[in-house]
Amino acid sequence: DAITILAPGTVANVVCGFDVLGFALSQPYDTMTMRLTAQRGIIIIINRDDYNLPTEPARNVAGAALLALLKAVPEEVGFEVEIAKGIKPGSGIGSSAASAAGAVVGANHLLGHRFSPAELVEFATYGEEVASGVRHADNIAPAIYGGVTLIRSTTPLDIIPIPAPLLYVTVVHPQIEVKTSDAREILKKEVLLRDAITQWGNVGGLIAGLMKGDYDLIGRSLEDVIIEPVRSILIPCFAAVKAQSLAAGALGGGISGSGPSIFMLSRDEATAHRVAAAMRAIYTGAGIDFHTYVSTI
Ligand code: HSE
């Protein structure tokens, strides 16, 4: 018997929380169909393969995550996974994490729910390693838990789901590719104490704002003085998108994950659509292809 999983896109970092915060989107998502097989091993089938994704299990993000999970399964079983990518690789909205997270959630379902969500995150990070060289969990954790998650620590893994009020998310994906590995390479390895103080004030403020449902505090805390000044250079029209989105009523936002997508949070749906219109006007004017998504957390 087959099961179908919808694996959501995710926004990592959430501006001030580099490598520690993330949230799941209601769209876009990947659709995955999985079956148990009698032989040990993984079979990956990619539908509509327009992205040249590898199907060799050790080189595929879903495959690598499932190989890690299989090591903890004593029975002679394997998995067949069919993946229809709805999230474009290299978009900055957790394409690789969706495939890895969806695969382990599906496998756990087929095995009768024997692993905890935290164990599934651990397995899925092996997929992220294939994609970017780093086992970061800030896309994986929200893809598995849903909502907003804090990864307080990666070793050992300590994931805290953060309650949040209703928030609308507008995402624009300008059609250029930014590799996560490149976007990490250009970061400075040291931060100034002054900047660190601003940053942890904002992380604390964002968590408090989410938990209290204080939209103004959420907006004030969406500021990144460490990563954004470096990475925004890779994203065309970044400053204009941010300024016009705020003018259209967004609470705040910034780079989604390692980019090139940009996300903005809004209190209501009408504002989220006005923000999308502002983003479309900018990229249409600049002659750059793009996609926009309006979603909720
Ligand atoms: N936290 C990671 C980064 C997420 O910003 O490099 C990549 O999607």
Image (cartoon, grey):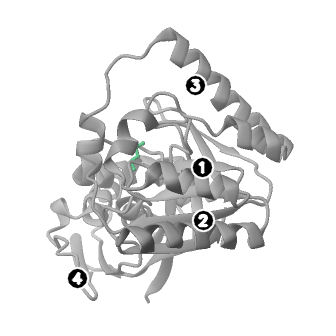
Image height of 123 relative to 172, above or below: above
Q: Which residue is mark 2?
A: 170
Q: Which residue is mark 1?
A: 253
Q: Is residue 179 left or right of residue 2?
A: left
- The percent coordinates of residue 61 (x first, y second) are 28, 61
Q: CA distance from mark 4 to mark 2?
A: 25 Å
Q: Please, what is the three-letter code of the amino acid marked with disc 3?
A: Gln
Q: Please, what is the three-letter code of the amino acid marked with disc 1?
A: Gly
- The percent coordinates of residue 105 (x first, y second) are 48, 66
Image height of 283 relative to 146, above or below: below
Q: Is residue 267 left or right of residue 36?
A: right
Q: Earlier in the sequence, mark 4 or mark 3?
A: 4
Image height of 146 relative to 283, above or below: above
Report the residue at 24% width, 77% height from top: 44
Q: Earlier in the sequence, mark 4 or mark 2?
A: 4
Indicate the secondary structure of the residue bearing disc 2: strand
- Residue 199 — which label? 3
Q: CA distance from mark 2 to mark 3?
A: 23 Å
- Residue 50 — which label? 4
Which quarter of the picture shows residue 266?
bottom right
Residue 107 visible from this viewpoint: no
User: Cβ of disc 2 within 8 Å of ligand 1?
Assistant: no
How crowded pointer 4 is (Cα within 10 Å; few <14, some 14-19, many 20+) is rated as: few
Q: Earlier in the sequence, mark 3 or mark 1?
A: 3
Q: Earlier in the sequence, mark 4 or mark 1?
A: 4
Q: CA distance from mark 2 to mark 1?
A: 9 Å
Report the residue at 37% width, 63% height from top: 91
